[in-house]
Image (tube, rainbow, N blue to C red):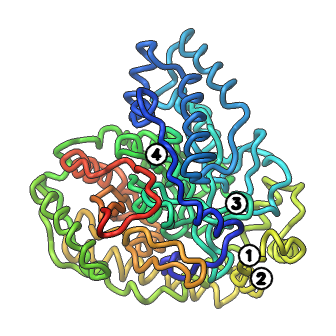
Amino acid sequence: MNRRNFVQVGLAAGAAAATSAQARGPAPRGPQAATAQLGVLELQAGMAAGRLTAQSLVAMYQSRIAALDRAGPKLRSIIELNPQAAAIARELDAERKAKGPRGPLHGIPVLLKDNIATADRMLSSAGSLALAHGPAKRDAHIVTRLRAAGAVILGKSNLSEWANLRSPRSTSGWSARGGLTRNPYALDRNTSGSSSGTAAAIAASLGAMGVGTETDGSIVSPASICGLVGIKPTLGLVSRAGIIPLAHTQDTSGPMTRSVSDAALLLQVLAGPDPRDAITVEGAARVPDYSQSLQRDGLKGARIGVARNFFGNNDELDAIIEIALKDLVAQGAVLVDPVEVPNSSKYGDSELDVLLFEFKADLPRYLADYAPDAPIRNMEDLIAFNVKHHDQELAFFGQEFLTRAQAKAGLDSEAYRTALANNQRYSRAEGLDQVLKEHRLDALVAPTGGPAWLTDFINGDHAGNGFSSPAAVAGYPHITVPAGLLHGLPVGLSFVGPAFSEAALIRYAYAYEQATQRRRAPTYPASVSRRSA
């Protein structure tokens, strides 16, 4: 069950005013704008040649944030800037001069979704006022790895509060702390979620790369809608420790970038073993050098199934994906068309049940470890906090999913075990594993989802169906790559494969991206239509 389908839009604090203010505002131009579009390897070349420094990159992105996020289009994608970023960049520049770079992320400014714990001067809040009390007690494991690689944590990005699991009437891209994130391709349209701010910010080149999180669709959907590459890794490849949880059997973090190359470089750093997350012991043994997958002929001989049961939601979208299929064939792929992912309708209700069970169980563990001074200790406390702070948290939509989670029994209950077994049976053995084995496939392709819908605070989201759930529920990898524009709005092509097939999927995605170059930078229009596109 795609979480975007059971999280419908509601009102958002200040959103009506934000949406009515349709001023586009001037976008930064000139050399700075050109530099902001560069990939990580190009930025490294600039720093090696002395044309750029980590300090100049931090200053450049901060300038763009001031011009595009705080003023101009007012994207509201950044929830908080790191006050230590400039100092960290200065230290990394000195280290580069003295010792050379640590690796490809040395001095690169990175944005983190605000449900990833950082033990610095920033908050880690999932967008909720309930966690706006102080910094986390320790870094998330992926933050430790980013810092060790020399990345500069530039700031935290806005998100759908509590990663979009609060109310069936909530809106993607809204949080009590950050307000409503706006889509840089059309300011009156939604960013999807829950990694809404990361998607909008990286699309607008407000950082070199971003890290999102996904339980179901929260990386690949906003990435697709904002014209990005998004990688949802295999469960167990990247540590979950220090990420504010929804559900441990589906949660993961992953790259959101403007290119496949950058996504591969970022995944290389994020992936790895963590003693705090035992599931990564197996996953860490499978981490290859993802840069070796950046092959322009990477589609040659790949046997790829076209998952036709995820087409048919939008004729114009399907037409764009048909062009993408021809591109795959032109690059040497062998298409098996059609195939069907079986039983994909059999775990919708049970997926939501598992999320609610695990959200209730996992939240107290995170709070005890990373936020022991928070005013809440568990789901019951969170519900009470929101009631107490009604005007900020509940004035526009409720917390129905939180109350439903609180009513769930423990993870030793038969209801939970039955729901989880159902999910794993129909998403894995009788789902993706079955279709991949039956047709001897290396991967599946389908539209990631539809284009961005108008943000509608009365009728709610109009997301339609997407291709996120099979891989999300199974815990398998999923990559989305820009496939083109539909009336000015980005849409993505998805590659899904078996567990720990990230290297192969990156190879296919890179070959497709390099052959087509379909991504276009946003221009921040107030709106788009058939006439204007």
Which three-letter amino acid code belongs to the residue tagged 3? Ala
Mark 4 closeness class: few <14, some 14–19, many ≥20 residues within 10 Å: many
Which three-letter amino acid code belongs to the residue tagged 4? Leu
Which of discs 3 and 2 lies nearer the camera? The answer is 3
Which mark is first along the chain, 4 or 2?
Answer: 4
Q: Residue furthest top?
A: 98
Which mark is first along the chain, 2 or 1?
Answer: 1
Relative image position of residue 257 (x, y in whole percent): 43, 47
Q: Which mark is residue 406?
A: 2
Above or below: residue 21 compared with residue 37: below
Is 209 or 373 nearer to us in this picture? Answer: 209
Which mark is first along the chain, 3 or 4?
Answer: 3
Which of discs 4 and 3 lies nearer the camera? The answer is 3
Mark 4, residue position: 267
Which three-letter amino acid code belongs to the residue tagged 2? Gln
Q: Which mark is residue 126?
A: 3
Task: Please state if 260 lies on the left or on the right of 278 as rendered.
Answer: left
Distance CA(mark 3)–CA(mark 2):
18 Å
Q: Does residue 440 appear in the picture of this structure? A: yes
Q: Secondary structure at mark 4?
A: helix
Q: Which mark is residue 360?
A: 1
The answer to the question of whether label 1 and label 2 lie on touching residues, with beta carbons closer than 8 A, is: yes
Relative image position of residue 409 (x, y in whole percent): 75, 86
Q: Does residue 420 appear in the picture of this structure? A: no
The answer to the question of whether label 4 and label 3 lie on touching residues, with beta carbons closer than 8 A, is: no
Q: Secondary structure at mark 3?
A: loop
Which three-letter amino acid code belongs to the residue tagged 1? Lys
Identify which residue is drawn at 64% across, 66% down: 174
Relative image position of residue 453 (x, y in whole percent): 45, 72
